[in-house]
Amino acid sequence: MTKPLFLKEIGPDYGNVPVLREGNKVRQVNTQENRNGQHWDFVQIGCGESWSFPEIKGPACISTIWMTLSPYRGKTWGNAWETGNFLLDFLDYRQFSALREVWLKIYFDNEPSPSVYAPIGNFFGPSFGEYRHYNSQFLGMTSGGYVCLFPMPFAESCRIVIENTNQKKFLNNFYGAITYNLLDRVEQDVGYFHARCRRESHPKKDVPYTVLQATGPGHYVGCNLSVKAHKMGNPLKIFSFLEGDWDFFIDGDGKPTISYTATEDYFQGGWYFNKGPYCTPTHGLIIKNRLLSSFFSKIRVSAYRFHVHDPISFQNGIKIVCHHGEWDEVDADYRSMVYWYQREAHSDFFDKTEGGTPSRKGV
């Protein structure tokens, strides 16, 4: 006699979707407002001002964050120059300053500093702060929208703030929807989501670029790295920053606990990403100049990796470094966006480093 087979046992992707979840309560906060009896789908954020979604009461877990935004506008609609710039940015919709200067901040359980703090362009995609169409298991830029599927549990409250750091231009159109599930409780062994960006426009010689430094317990789940060469010329030399190894120091280990043989190897590519951009659920290359274009423009690379099946856990702390060249000798502009889970309180490492705080230039 064969053993009965139940629907839940044939795999989470196929088996769990049709299973009815007793007591499951799904809720949402969004940008829809009623202004003077009229329905508005978007909000406007003034120069140097912030706007907050309605606070979410826990215990709960955010399942989806969706956003989109327009390019900046000047202070008035009547200026033909400002209107022309707005239309050109909107029609191109690839690189505009709002993606670098409008920041996403997420606070859990009334914490004093945000667990998530980054420009919108960096958080959802390339750390160059520009729109590039791609999608992965957790993050994507899809036909003008920005989506995050990282689960974000919290016990007491969640406050999501959109901050316009530009002091001269206002954000005319910001749309967003945060979908979450109410929970009975959040267990003590559940980590809180964290995401931070940083930049070193000229990494120090003989010193690797630090991607993440955190005190635990927690686990690292991925990052986006974007690098731009400072010089043009021989493509074999311009791409030499990719020779840099990736080293993971876990719980105070004096030598690397985990090490990858080159930067593109960590992102699951090879040979300087010789086949060009690609995207999968867990790793991908969003931007790479063609080889010969190094004679006419500065080479750029932007890649992501998520540790879905192999989260890298730490109990006391972790430090992740990316070497810029084989011996940390290559001068290039390094920008990164890192994602991890841990219990509070998080350290202030990112607040003390270059690119850790907002500016008009962005990160």
Image: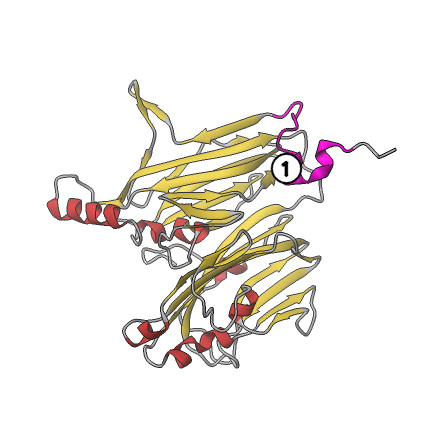
Segment colored magenta: 5-24
Q: Is residue 149 left or right of residue 256?
A: left
Looking at the rendered structure, the number of numbered marks drawn on it comes to 1
> Residue 15 colored magenta?
yes
Q: Which residue is mark 1?
A: 14
What residue is drawn where x is 60% and y is 34%? 156
SS at mark 1 in the image = helix
Q: Is residue 184 left or right of residue 201?
A: right
Q: Is 102 located above or below residue 259 in the figure? A: above
Q: Amino acid at mark 1?
A: Tyr
User: Which residue is at the front of the view, 277 or 102?
Assistant: 277
Rendering coords of residue 190 (x, y %):
67, 43
Q: Is 22 located above or below residue 300 in the figure? A: above
Magenta segment, prevailing SS (helix, strand or loop): loop
Residue 168 in view: no
Rendering coords of residue 275 (x, y %):
45, 67
View extreme (front): residue: 1
> Residue 124 colored magenta?
no
